[in-house]
C-alpha cells in the first residue's frame, strides 16, 4: 500500500523512525493589536470600498436592505441576526431553507444572497463565514450580488485575532471561508473583471 | 542544451508580441508585490518571512509526523486520506471512485500539482469529462496548452487569441471584450458546476492540527468546486502540510502579497471533512490525496530539501530577468522560472534538461523575493555541480579536470606563474578564429594585453 511505502520513504530520508516524537514547533506568530472599535469600523468600510465593494454603517439595516433589493429576488440565510433585524421578512426575500437541493435551486436563480457573518476583519475588509445550520455556503456564492449584514461588535482587527479566537476552526465547522471583496479575475491580458464565478457585487452593512 | 530548449528560448525571444506580454504582465505583478510588502505597508514583512521559513523547515524535517497528524484529524471529521506515489495511482483512485458512484462529470479548480501528473488527460482518456474552471486554466484547456505562469496561467494569450479560441471551440460569435468573454465562460461553467458529480481541487496548505485543507483563490471557482458537487477530492503534494491553523496568520499574509499584491486573496477556504450534521450544503464525501510524485527524492539532501518550502506564489518568476525574456513555455516541465529551474531537475533528474540550472544569471533576485526564503541561487549552484558530476562526456570532463589541476598547480607556484605570464605576453594577442571561442569572439573584442603584469608594476611603484 502506498501509504506505508511513502511514509517509509519519508522517514528513511529524514532519519526518523515510526512514531518518533518531534521537537516543539517554533511558536506560532500571533500579534493582536489594540484597536478601538470606531477605528475598526472605519478601516472595514475603507478596505471594502477600496476593493470596489459597497460598505456602510447603519442603525437600520433592514431599511437599507429593503431599498437595495427592491424589485429583485433574494435568498437570505437562517442566521438569527437577520430575522432579529427583520430582514428575512422583507418582500422578495426567501429564507428558512434547510434542504440542500432547494437551497441550490433558490440560489441559482436569485438576484441577491443575504447573509450575516461570524466575524469581519478590519485590516483587510474581510468577511469570515462559518458553515452551520444558520449559514449555508452557496448563498454568498451563487447569486450575482452578496449583501452581508454584520453587527459591529463582530469586527476583529485581523487574521491574528481571528486565529487567537479560533485556534482550530475545524472544531466548529467543516467550512470556514474568508471573503475579501467581489469575485475577480485578471486572466485575460491582466484586465480586471469582477464577478467571474462568485458575486461581482458585495455590500457590507455594519449594523449598530 | 537540448535542441528543444534552445529552440523554444529563441522562438520566444524572436516573438515581439510575446516579449511585450511577458514583460508587461510580470512587471505589473512585480510592482504590486513591492507596494504591499514595502516597509511602510508591512513593517513586519521580514519577520514574517523568517517565521514562515522556520515553520516550513520544521514541518519538512518532521514530515511523517505531521502527515499522520493531518490524517488522524481529518479522519475525525469524516474525511479520508489517500496516499499516492504517482499520477497513475491518482488516476486509478479517481476512476474507481467515479465508477462506484456512477460519476461522469468532474469540475476542477486550479492546481499545479494536478498539472504535474496530467490528470485531465488521464481521466478523459478513460471517458470522464474533467473541466478546468479557473478562467485562465479553462482557456488553456480549450487551447490544449499548459500554464505559462504559476499564478497567471494564460498571460501569453491576448484577448484576440481568446476570441478565436471561444469561437472555434464553443461555437459562439467572435467576442474580444474581456468582460464579455468572462461572462460567457461564467455561464458555460456555471452549468458544469451545477451538473458535476465530483469536484477536484488542489490545496495551498494542509493544516495538521485541524485536519484541514486551505485553498486560496480570487474567482470563486474553487469554492464552487468544493461546495456544489457531492464529492470533493483535494489533491496535494505531501510537502504542503503545516503544523497549526495559527500558522496561517503568517502564511496568508505573505502568499497573496507575494503572488498578486493583494492583502488577502478574495476567497480563502478552510475545509475539514464533508458537511456535518445540520449544515445545509457542502459535499457528502471528502477525500485528500497526498501525492509523492518525486517529492521524497528531495528529502535526503538537507540543503536542497528547502525547495519543498515553496508556496507557489510566483514572485520569483516575476522578478527573474531570465523568465522575463524566455517566458514559461521554454521551461521543460510545468514549473517555470527560478523555482522551476530548481524543482524540475530534482523531480525529473538533472539529465531531463541539463542546461536548466545554467540558464540563470545568478543575480539573486529570486532569493530576495521568496516569501519563505528558499535560497534558490545556492540550490542552482548545487545543481550545476550535480550536472557536472553526472556529465556523460567523460573525455571532455577529464580534459577539463586536467586543465583545472594544472591551473591550480601554476597558481601555487608564483615564480613559474610569472614566467608563464611573460611568455604568454611575448606571443602577442591570441587569435581564435575557429572553434567554439571563435564564434563567441566574433561579436566581442578581447582587451589588448598590457605591457607589464600587475605584480611587476607593484614591485616598481
Image: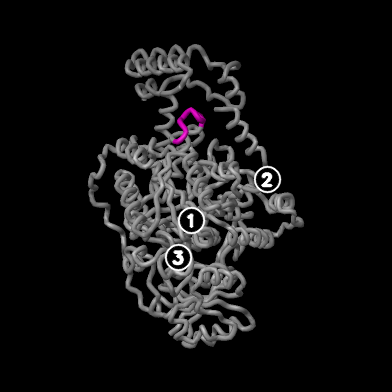
Instruction: Pick the residue in front: B164 or B436.
Output: B164
Q: CA distance from mark 2 to mark 3?
A: 39 Å
Whole-percent x and y of residue B7?
62, 32
Q: Which mark's residue is nearer the viewer, 2 or 3?
A: 3
Whether residue B371 is in magenta: the answer is: no
Point out the stretch of residues depicted in magenta.
B347-355
Q: CA distance from mark 1 to mark 2?
A: 40 Å
Whole-percent x and y of residue B129?
60, 49
Q: Are marks 3 and 1 in contact (CB under 8 Å)?
A: no
Circle number at residue B17: 2
Figure label count? 3
- Residue lying at the far right of the rendered structure: B173
Under circle 3, the secondary element is: strand
Q: How packed is label 1: few (under 14 Cα within 10 Å), some, or many (20 or more)?
A: many
Instruction: Pick the residue in front: B417 or B106.
Output: B106
Q: Are marks 3 and 1 on the same chain?
A: no
Q: Which mark's residue is nearer the viewer, 3 or 1?
A: 1
Whether A158 is drawn above or below B449: the answer is: below
Instruction: Pick the residue in front: B434 or B396.
Output: B396
Q: Are marks 2 and 3 on the same chain?
A: no
Q: Which mark's residue is nearer the viewer, 1 or 2?
A: 1
Residue in the picture at 59% in, 40% down? B329
Circle number at residue A177: 3
Chain that bears disc 3 = A
Circle number at residue B232: 1
Kindly tell me whether residue B335 is visible in this rendering. Answer: no
Residue in the picture at 49% in, 56% down? B231
Amino acid at each position: 500500500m502506498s501509504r506505508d511505502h511513502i511514509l517509509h520513504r519519508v522517514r528513511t530520508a529524514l532519519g526518523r523512525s515510526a512514531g518518533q516524537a518531534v521537537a516543539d514547533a517554533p511558536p506560532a506568530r500571533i500579534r493582536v493589536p489594540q484597536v478601538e472599535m470606531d477605528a475598526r469600523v472605519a478601516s472595514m468600510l475603507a478596505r471594502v470600498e477600496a476593493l470596489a465593494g459597497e460598505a456602510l454603517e447603519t442603525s437600520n439595516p433592514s431599511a437599507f436592505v429593503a431599498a437595495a433589493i427592491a424589485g429583485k429576488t433574494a435568498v437570505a440565510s437562517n442566521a438569527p441576526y437577520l430575522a432579529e433585524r427583520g430582514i428575512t421578512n422583507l418582500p422578495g426575500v426567501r429564507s428558512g431553507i434547510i434542504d440542500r437541493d432547494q437551497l441550490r435551486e433558490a440560489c441559482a436563480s436569485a438576484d441577491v444572497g443575504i447573509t450575516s457573518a461570524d466575524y469581519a476583519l478590519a485590516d483587510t475588509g474581510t468577511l469570515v463565514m462559518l458553515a452551520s445550520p444558520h449559514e449555508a455556503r452557496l448563498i454568498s456564492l451563487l447569486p450575482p450580488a452578496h449583501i452581508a449584514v454584520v453587527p459591529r461588535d463582530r469586527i476583529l482587527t485581523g487574521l491574528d485575532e481571528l486565529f487567537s479566537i479560533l485556534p482550530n476552526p475545524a472544531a466548529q465547522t467543516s467550512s470556514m471561508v474568508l471573503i475579501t471583496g467581489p469575485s475577480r479575475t485578471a486572466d485575460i491580458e491582466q484586465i480586471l473583471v469582477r464577478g467571474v464565478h462568485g458575486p461581482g457585487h458585495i455590500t457590507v452593512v455594519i449594523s449598530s | 542544451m537540448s535542441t528543444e530548449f534552445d529552440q523554444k528560448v529563441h522562438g520566444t525571444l524572436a516573438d515581439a508580441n510575446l516579449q511585450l506580454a511577458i514583460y508587461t504582465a510580470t512587471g505589473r505583478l512585480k510592482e504590486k508585490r513591492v507596494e504591499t510588502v514595502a516597509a511602510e505597508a508591512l513593517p513586519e514583512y521580514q519577520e514574517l518571512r523568517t517565521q514562515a521559513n522556520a515553520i516550513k523547515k520544521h514541518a519538512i524535517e518532521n514530515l511523517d509526523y505531521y502527515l499522520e497528524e493531518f490524517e488522524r484529524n481529518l479522519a475525525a471529521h469524516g474525511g479520508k486520506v489517500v496516499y499516492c506515489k504517482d499520477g497513475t495511482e491518482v488516476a486509478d483512485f479517481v476512476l474507481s471512485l467515479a465508477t462506484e458512484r456512477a460519476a461522469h462529470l468532474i469540475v476542477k479548480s486550479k492546481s499545479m500539482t494536478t498539472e504535474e501528473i496530467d490528470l485531465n488527460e488521464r481521466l478523459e482518456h478513460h471517458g470522464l469529462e474533467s473541466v478546468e474552471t479557473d478562467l485562465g486554466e479553462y482557456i488553456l484547456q480549450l487551447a490544449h496548452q499548459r500554464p505559462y505562469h504559476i499564478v497567471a496561467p494564460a498571460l501569453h494569450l491576448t484577448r484576440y487569441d481568446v476570441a478565436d479560441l471561444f469561437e472555434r471551440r464553443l461555437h459562439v460569435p467572435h467576442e474580444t471584450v474581456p468582460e464579455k468573454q468572462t461572462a460567457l465562460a461564467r455561464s458555460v461553467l456555471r452549468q458544469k458546476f451545477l451538473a458535476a458529480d465530483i469536484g477536484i481541487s488542489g490545496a495551498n496548505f494542509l493544516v495538521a492540527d485541524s485536519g484541514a485543507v486551505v485553498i486560496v483563490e480570487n474567482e470563486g471557482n474553487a469554492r464552487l468546486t468544493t461546495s456544489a458537487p457531492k464529492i470533493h477530492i483535494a489533491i496535494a503534494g505531501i510537502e504542503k502540510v503545516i503544523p497549526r491553523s495559527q500558522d496561517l496568520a503568517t502564511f496568508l499574509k505573505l502568499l497573496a502579497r507575494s503572488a498578486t499584491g493583494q492583502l488577502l486573496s478574495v476567497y480563502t477556504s478552510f475545509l475539514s471533512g464533508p458537511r456535518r450534521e445540520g449544515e445545509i450544503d457542502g459535499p457528502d464525501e471528502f477525500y485528500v490525496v497526498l501525492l509523492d510524485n518525486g517529492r521524497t527524492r528531495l528529502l535526503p539532501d538537507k540543503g536542497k530539501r528547502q525547495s519543498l518550502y515553496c508556496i507557489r506564489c510566483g514572485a520569483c518568476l516575476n522578478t527573474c530577468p531570465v523568465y522575463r525574456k524566455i517566458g514559461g513555455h521554454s521551461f521543460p516541465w510545468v514549473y517555470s522560472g527560478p523555482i522551476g529551474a530548481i524543482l524540475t531537475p530534482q523531480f525529473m533528474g538533472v539529465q531531463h534538461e541539463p542546461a536548466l540550472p545554467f540558464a540563470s544569471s545568478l543575480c539573486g533576485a529570486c532569493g530576495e523575493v521568496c516569501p519563505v526564503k528558499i535560497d534558490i541561487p545556492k540550490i542552482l549552484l548545487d545543481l550545476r555541480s550535480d550536472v557536472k558530476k553526472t556529465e556523460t562526456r567523460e573525455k571532455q570532463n577529464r580534459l577539463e579536470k586536467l586543465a583545472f589541476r594544472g591551473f591550480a598547480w601554476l597558481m601555487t607556484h608564483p615564480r613559474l606563474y610569472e614566467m608563464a605570464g611573460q611568455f604568454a605576453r611575448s606571443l602577442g594577442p591570441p587569435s581564435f578564429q575557429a572553434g567554439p571561442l571563435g564564434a563567441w569572439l566574433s561579436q566581442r573584442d578581447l582587451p589588448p594585453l598590457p605591457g607589464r603584469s600587475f605584480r611587476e608594476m607593484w614591485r616598481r611603484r
